[in-house]
Image (cartoon, rainbow, N blue to C red):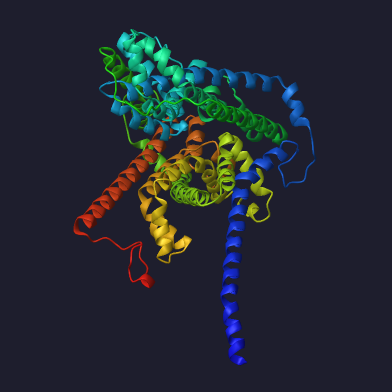
Amino acid sequence: MPDRADAGIKAIEPDMSVIAQRAFGRAIWLAFAFAMFVLFVWPVLMLAIGSFRTTPPGAAGDWTLDGVRNLFTNPGIAEGVQDTLFLSFFLTIFVTLLAVFFSWVVARTNTPLRWLVTPLMVVVLATPQLFFGLSWAMLGNESAGLINYTIRTVTGTSWSPFNVESWSGIIFVLTLKVTAFGYLLMVGPFGSMDRTLEEASRTSGAGAVRTFFRVTIPVLTPAVAGVAILVFTNGLESFDIPLLLGLPAGIGVLATQIYDAVNKTLPPNYAAAGTLSLLLTLTVMALVLVRSRIMAGRSYAVISGKGHKTEPADIGGWRFVATGLILVYALLAVILPLVQMLVGSLQPVFGLYRGFTLDNYLAVLDDSQIVRSLVNTAIVAVIGGFVAMTLAVIIGYVGRHSGRTTRHVLEFTTWLPWTLPGVVLGLAMLWAYISLPGLKLLYSTIWILMIGLIVAVIPVVSRVSDAALVQIGPELEESSRVAGGGRIATFFRIVLPLIAPSFVAGWTVAGIMISGNLAIPVMLSSATSQTVPVQAYDLYIAGEVSQTAAIFCIQLGGILVALIAVGLIRAFAGLNARRKVGTGDLAPSLTDSRTGGRND
């Protein structure tokens, strides 16, 4: 009898183990779902609630419709809406034209310097809007800017034709910045289009220009329309450049009005800020849905099976014109802003082009508050970038091994904050976390700032992680599980080492984006948690333009050092991997001791 009882107990033990594993799995899923809700969904809900409150959510206050009434009765709101639409409309036209042109040049022609365009656009995209705004605010300053100074010196007159603090200046600078975004989205469809379609048009007697407008553009209409909509939403969300260049000219868009309602109104008009934020968010969401419907509603086959060609076409003498335009864009978008920032940091007084000195650097490094902002920026960039990329990989890995519904829910959840302009996301994060008892302790600390920046960059770095994960064949993970490895062990032993280069690249991109973000820190930071963008903006407003340039040059130097270090690490890792392959010293990563080292 005892033996029979013992046998029954032993038969039950595996079942109890399975039950415990399932319970642990459910707990992990619940924790994961809760974290996703708090990070990505809760701020949007609090933004909606805050639109109808006289105080931030969690604080004592009353329900009100003042924010809604303010939309229809305040003439300043109507003017802000008109200005925002005006900016977005012309930005969309110019960026779409430039993005189409550069994509066509790179993917479809034999232009000599076409190889330069993609890395150039990556650099421009990674450069913070604040850097663009500040550098061009200095370059295009009517009295002291480098452009007008050069014109006055060359002509020997007092003529200063360029004033960037105007509608034309704002649109021009934003166009330079956003063109990189449009190009990187559009160059793929241009590159994959079958060239035989264009060759058929040329054979029938159409010229290159006529073929471009009659064949290339109509075939790529969905891609062009989709990018145009995203560029329009980018215009709606723009904050840094309109704040820097529009404020002196009396130009205000919705994003800057939201900032003013919270930071420049006493007492802060939370209802108006919330309602404006909700209006802007719903508009962006609607446009994103329209883009999705356009992209899904029609099927344009740009790759054929037989005789598919993607070789560049010879455009004759026009290739030199295209080369010239590439150089002009590089000059305006990268070279001139960097030169102005460097020259400005060495000027004793902004606009004085003699007596260059390092005093601005010494003054910046001697200021404890500025040094603290540099340290804060390094902390949030390194740690925040790592956490953002880690979360992106986890979310992508979970989605890849889940059902279709779960995968779509994860994609929607992570992209939800992307529909919020930066200043709106900052306001939403503020309201979300001061309304939760535990997270309320993070208020005015560097950690709430880091959380907001992580949420902001995850939609971007998730594209990097997804592209890396999709390249891993399922047979590798299956082999690990056959060898006895569990899901977690497989992730750390197989998946993570294979995507390590992409992980480092995504970490770097996230860190650069975090270090240059102004919209979120300006809403979430306190006196002790300010980052370089906030400190630089304060210095610029206070008239310390040369010190502003110095602090940005220090930050750019730090980014350059980090990029060199990452490049050296990746190069060393590649050499080490090739050495192992050459000597046959490969680690049996797909083996397990219980299988005797057998690789399944």
Residue 260 seen in the figure: no
**Farthest residue in the front direction?**
306
Question: Could you tell me residue 180's position as x and y percent?
Answer: 42, 28
Q: Quadrant of the rendered structure where residue 148 is?
A: top left
Q: How many marks?
A: 0
Residue 513, quarter of picture: top left
Of 388 and 405, the residue lying toward us = 405
Image quadrant holding the C terminus, namely bottom left
The foreground one among 235 and 141 is 235
558, 345: nearer the viewer: 558
- Residue 41 found in image quarter: top right
The quadrant of the image that shows the N terminus is bottom right
Residue 471 picture location, percent across and down: 39, 46
Residue 473 point in image, percent of width and height? 39, 50
Taking the view exactly as shown, the residue that stands out farthest to the left is: 583
Taking the image as shown, residue 534 lies to the left or right of residue 599, namely right
Q: Position of residue 164 (x, y in %)?
A: 46, 19
Residue at the bottom extreme, as displayed: 1
Give the side of residue 100 with respect to residue 222, left or right. Answer: left
Q: Nearer the viewer, residue 474 or 462?
A: 474
Residue 565 in view in this figure: yes
